[in-house]
Amino acid sequence: MKDCSLCTKQHCSVMEGIPYASFTSFATKSLSFSSLSPSSIIVPHRKSQKNTLKSVSPRKLVIRASSASSSGSVVTLLDYGAGNVRSLRNAIHFLGFKIEDVQTPKDILNAERLIFPGVGAFASAMDVLVKTGMDEALRTYIKDDRPFLGICLGLQLLFEYSEENGPVNGLGLVPGVVGRFNSSNGFRVPHIGWNALQIAKDSEILEDVGDQHVYFVHSYRAMPSDDNKEWVSSTCNYGDDFIASIRRGNVHGVQFHPEKSGDVGLSILRRFLLPNSRGKKNPTQGKASKLAKRVIACLDVRTNDKGDLVVTKGDQYDVREHTKENEVRNLGKPVELAGQYYKDGADEVSFLNITGFRDFPLGDLPMLQVLRQASENVFVPLTVGGGIRDFTDANGRYYSSLEVASEYFRSGADKISIGSDAAYAAEEYLKTKVKTGKSSLEQISRVYGNQAVVVSIDPRRVYLKSPNDVEFKTIRVTKPGPNGEEYAWYQCTVNGGREGRPIGAYELAKAVEELGAGEILLNCIDCDGQGKGFDIDLIKLISDAVSIPVIASSGAGAVEHFSEVFTESNASAALAAGIFHRKEVPIQSVKRHLLKEGIEVRM
Ligand code: 1PR
């Protein structure tokens, strides 16, 4: 499994497609990933990006780009052919810096300030570093105490070795071992979401953090010990206290993703890029904290009858107005709304291309464009779903689901979400008990890591007189059905709820976890757009059945619905659409209510 989805993106595909030995010139070679993609429609992803600061200014710390002094400053990025650290590139550009990519080991030695996001799995990353001589250059650079920031895997690689598909030797600069989180004690793995830090010592770049949350997404971590205590600058508690950041002199490393941690993350990057930009503060002691519950804003996107890409919203998946014109409901523009929700404090933003089942997404350039633009100004995780499946176009050109996902990642997605195709894969797996490795779910999670793959489930409640009426998992419902039925099962659907399948939500959730899903987005057609609250029966059933995070979706109509779902079920996140689009309930009101109810959230 890859450790870090935010870092991974096209990296592993590049490495699968190109022998390591050919990585002589990293950044240049990485462009050859487009050979995996339909060349006619892929926009080169390494174009320099414009700084579009004007449109969004983050909420609290008000991190602004390019003060006159920083404008034009250059930072060196070790993106070892790996690709899309697009989020990080966007954040650096947002702060007004230019990026120079490392092409040879010499570029590392000549760097004034080096950021190493680290990508993919530990072993393959080390392999690339060793084969290209970057390992030695990095050791020299770091031993010389030059300005360095390792992010996620870029931190882990500094340790002696990792247990990820290993043991595998690391750079050996920091004493300790990188091991997997233990899921047996009830903590869901991957560790996805917002946690606060316990600051251990003056870490300079963390001075603005205090008890604010930062965004983690990983399955492996290093532990603090006597041997590495001179390095550890903060820890985070998730089952155990693990190393959240290190600092010695000018060398920094963070396990979390500053580029996806909202304005506090931007301030961390800024402090690394401009170390003397502000006066010294005393390190603030962060509160030990649990993983915060996430509040996610969801944008269902489709083309309306005029051909414009709009955010729409259904009632039980019917997105058309009940008027003579019967037009698609238009609730706003996707990029604008995503930017707004980021400013309002959404912990993640999801785009669902709801007609992806019939409109091939790689032909749907506006959606890719939306992602590219949104990711320039939204510094929390972006998920995109819809149409991720194998596809043959009218000219007989075959596109694998991996290519579709790769293009979404390259365009700025941090996670992709699979709906219909995951249902087919789960059915097949339950029938044959064989993991073929060929389903979209398996392929994408193998290349990009489990944490990059969300499975979206679209179930419909079917009431039953007796629990033995179907072969699927049934529950005793809290509220009886229309004819007094006391039981129900949740039938999965595909193609935007149009077709019921012979599989229940319970069976599907368990199967996709085994096939490599890192998270479940649990919708409910009956509750969608009704504003009467989440389907707690369903969410309890699924969140108790799997050990990956479950996002509760469909039905939020009031702040109390969010506290209800978090107290009554083991959901890790709650997603809503209609109440946010119609401005009925601001995201901050939801969070304030949750805090008042004693539920930890990122403010
Ligand atoms: O099957 O892989 O192409 O993915 C299609 C994706 O599009 C799936 O994730 C599926 O859930 C979604 N989708 C398809 N049709 C619709 C529709 O509404 N007609 N939207 C649709 C699903 C459900 C939620 C919604 C919540 C919250 N929308 O995303 O946002 O129910 O709404 P609420 O807070 O207003 O109640 P594939």
Image (cartoon, rainbow, N blue to C red):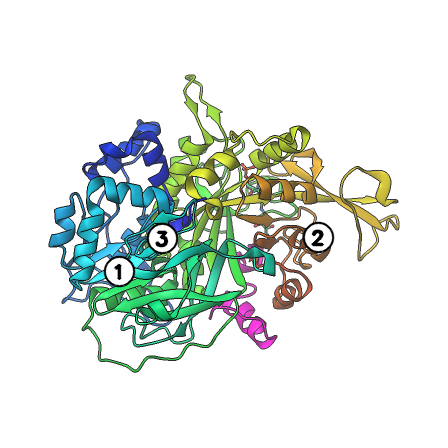
Task: Residue 143: say if magenta.
Answer: no
> Disc 2 residue type?
Leu
In this rendering, the label closer to the viewer, 2 or 3: 3
Q: Is residue 138 above or below residue 444?
A: below
**Alpha-carbon distance for marks 1 and 2?**
42 Å
Among the 4 quarters of the image, the one containing residue 70: bottom left
Residue extending farthest to the top is 396
Tell me the magenta residue range.
Answer: 576-603
Q: Amino acid at mark 3?
A: Tyr
Pointer 1 residue: 149
In this picture, residue 73 sits left or right of residue 170: left
Quadrant housing residue 28: top left
* Earlier sequence position, callout 1 versus callout 3: 1
Whole-percent x and y of residue 94?
26, 58
- Please name whichever residue, 577 or 407, is drawn nearer the observer in this view of the structure: 407
State which tag comes first along the sequence, 2 or 3.
3
Q: Which mark is residue 161?
A: 3
Quarter of the image where ligand 1 sits: top right
Nearer the observer, 550 or 435? 435
Q: Which residue was labeled with disc 2?
A: 541
Identity of the residue drawn at 41% across and 20% down: 397
CB atoms at circles 2 and 3 under 8 Å apart?
no
Report the mark closest to the observer, 1 or 3. 3
Count the labels in the image.
3
Q: Is residue 602 magenta?
A: yes
Crowd class of label 1 (few under 14; some 14 to 19; many from 20; radius 10 Å): many
Structural distance between the alpha carbons of marks 1 and 3: 19 Å
> Which one is in front in this view, the residue at disc 1 or the one at disc 2?
1
Tell me the SS state at disc 3: strand
Marked residue nearer the N-terminal end (1 or 2): 1
Image quadrant of residue 458? top right
Establish if 233 lies above or below 583. below
